[in-house]
Image: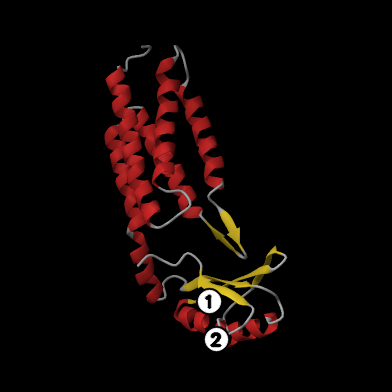
């Protein structure tokens, strides 16, 4: 085999890249995100494999060029995890997680196993535990306690009444986004104070045109 890396070393690096990425993917899977365990494992494994091939399979190859292409490719993949729902953009954290596991896979691919392990631990902590800190800070007013909310309607006959209800419950509500899904379905998207989420959800269900009303991507408890 070309290069100084044996088959055993290749295999170990690829396996560890998949395992490290799987740890991050497990957290995303537990949160029911668009990209879960298998996606993260495949991204980390693929990044490690490209790194190995670019660095060792060809004489005189420039590994940095392969690494740059991996980053570009993962960028396109991450963009697929981001979507807009009304005035809100969702999936940014999942996209960032995919970008992080690609870096972890590349780190394992070049043989910096300890670095990949530390990066995995840091990524897992950021995704899994910092949400609790955000909750505490939100309760203390250090960060915004407004939550994205979505209302699905079968028609717009009660639109003005629903809008008035939203304003009466939370007068700090800003722009309300209206999106037509199909001929018979519309979606309202807006931000509401965390303390009003349950009150608004119960009150808004009284309208005949309301199909569903819920908080979008609620924080982990």
Residue on which the image places disc 1: 192
Q: How far across and down, in percent of the image, does residue 173 sit? A: 58, 78
Residue on which the image places disc 2: 169
Label 2 and label 1: CA atoms lie apart by 9 Å
Query: Which element carries disc 1, helix, strand or loop?
Result: strand
* Quarter of the image that includes the C terminus: bottom left
Number of marks drawn? 2
Residue 134: name its quadrant: bottom left
Q: How is the image coloured?
A: secondary structure
Q: How far across and down, in percent of the image, does residue 29 sit? A: 39, 52
Which residue is found at the position 53% from the left and 85% from the top?
203
* Above or below for 160 versus 41: below
Q: How far across and down, in percent of the image, does residue 3 sit? A: 36, 14
Q: Residues within 10 Å of mark 2 (few under 14, many from 20)?
A: some
Query: Which element carries disc 2, helix, strand or loop?
Result: helix
Q: Would residue 201 appear left or right of 142 to someone viewing this image?
A: right
Q: Residues within 10 Å of mark 1 (few under 14, many from 20)?
A: many
Which residue is found at the position 56% from the left and 82% from the top?
204
In front of the other: 66 or 38: 38
């Amino acid at each position: 085999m070309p290069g100084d890396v044996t088959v055993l070393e290749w295999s170990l690096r690829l396996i560890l890249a998949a395992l490290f990425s799987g740890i991050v993917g497990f957290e995303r899977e537990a949160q029911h995100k668009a990209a879960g365990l298998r996606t993260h494992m495949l991204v980390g494994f693929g990044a490690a494999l490209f790194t190995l091939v670019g660095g060792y399979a060809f004489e005189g190859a420039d590994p940095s060029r392969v690494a740059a292409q991996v980053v570009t490719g993962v960028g396109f993949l991450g963009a697929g995890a981001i979507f807009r729902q009304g005035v809100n953009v969702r999936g940014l954290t999942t996209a960032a997680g995919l970008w992080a596991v690609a870096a972890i896979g590349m780190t394992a691919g070049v043989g910096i196993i300890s670095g990949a392990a530390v990066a995995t631990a840091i990524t897992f902590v950021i995704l899994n535990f910092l949400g609790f800190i955000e909750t505490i800070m939100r309760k203390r007013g250090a960060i915004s306690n407004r939550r994205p909310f979505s209302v699905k309607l079968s028609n717009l006959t009660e639109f003005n009444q629903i809008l008035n209800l939203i304003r009466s419950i939370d007068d700090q509500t800003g722009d309300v986004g209206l999106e037509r899904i199909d001929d018979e379905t519309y979606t309202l998207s807006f931000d509401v104070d965390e303390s009003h989420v349950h009150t608004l959800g119960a009150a808004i269900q009284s309208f005949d045109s309301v199909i569903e009303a819920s908080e979008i991507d609620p924080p982990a408890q």
